[in-house]
Amino acid sequence: MGNHNGETKDSSENQLLSELKVADLALYYDEMVRSHLVELEVESPAGKIVLKRKQTEKELSYLQRRKNDSTLVFSDPVRTLPEQPAVASDVPMIKSPIMGTFYRSSSPQSAPFVKEGDTVNSGSTLCIVEAMKVMNEIKADSRCKIIKICVENGKPIAKGDPLFHIEMS
């Protein structure tokens, strides 16, 4: 059971769990569901944690059909992000600092924060990335011109995905 102090986890497990906040675990879980992953390993200097989730009947049925009959073609229920065209590494861009859902405006009825061709000042809100029901404003670090908006409104994005191609002003 536990040790003499009544603890049920050793100190390295406690350190790992303290490094991984519940919000982080929930983000990993949401991504697992979205990507139809059953298992995910997360490592930190303190150790490794393995997240597992049960599969739904629909997922199990789909996977079993794929496994048993490779000649049948089923529509793929796994949602994939569209292929991003290759971008020259020297093109300045603003990338997403977090995983979530990209929104161009604060509400469906509101005008977008920016449009292609707009010049914005440092600190101007460019978009919102929703992560776990929290709306995170993404702001410009410096004055720049928006050359291209790389993501469609309401689409999922990953940390590091390009959001905007910019030209420094």
Image: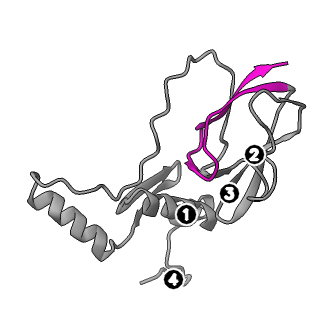
Q: Real-space Cα distance between discs 3 and 2? A: 10 Å
Name the mark on residue 100. Answer: none
Image vertical order of residue 98 relative to residue 74, above or below: above
Which residue range is magenta in the image? Answer: 144-169
Residue highlighted by disc 4: 4
Q: Kindly report the distance in space between the C-alpha atoms of the residues bearing marks 1 and 4.
A: 30 Å
Give the Cα distance between marks 4 and 2: 53 Å
Helix, strand or loop for disc 3: strand
Q: How many C-alpha atoms fall within 10 Å of the one at disc 4: few (<14), some, or many (≥20)? A: few
Residue where numbered disc 2 is placed? 127
Report how far apart the C-alphas of labels 2 and 1 lie in the structure: 25 Å
Three-letter amino acid code at the position of disc 1: Leu
Which residue is drawn at the image coordinates 61% and 44% (left, top)?
A: 152
**What residue did someone put label 3 on?**
130
CA neighbours of label 2 inside 10 A, class few (<14), some (14 to 19), many (20+): many
N-terminal-most mark, 3 or 4: 4
Is residue 100 among what the camera can see? yes
Front-most of residues 114 and 96? 114
Q: Residue 124 falls in which quadrant of the image?
A: top right
Q: Amino acid at mark 4?
A: His
Marks 2 and 1, the one that precedes in the sequence = 1
* Residue 36 percent across, percent down from the top left: 37, 60
Front position among marks 3 and 4: 3
Q: Report which residue position mark 1 lands on.
A: 25
Q: Earlier in the sequence, mark 3 or mark 1?
A: 1
Q: Quadrant of residue 77?
A: bottom left
Q: Position of residue 163 (x, y in %)?
A: 65, 37
The magenta stretch spans residue 38? no
Element assignment for label 1? helix
Give the amino acid type for the residue marked by disc 2 in the picture.
Cys
| Residue 98 x/y as whole percent | 64, 48
Amino acid carrying label 3: it is Glu
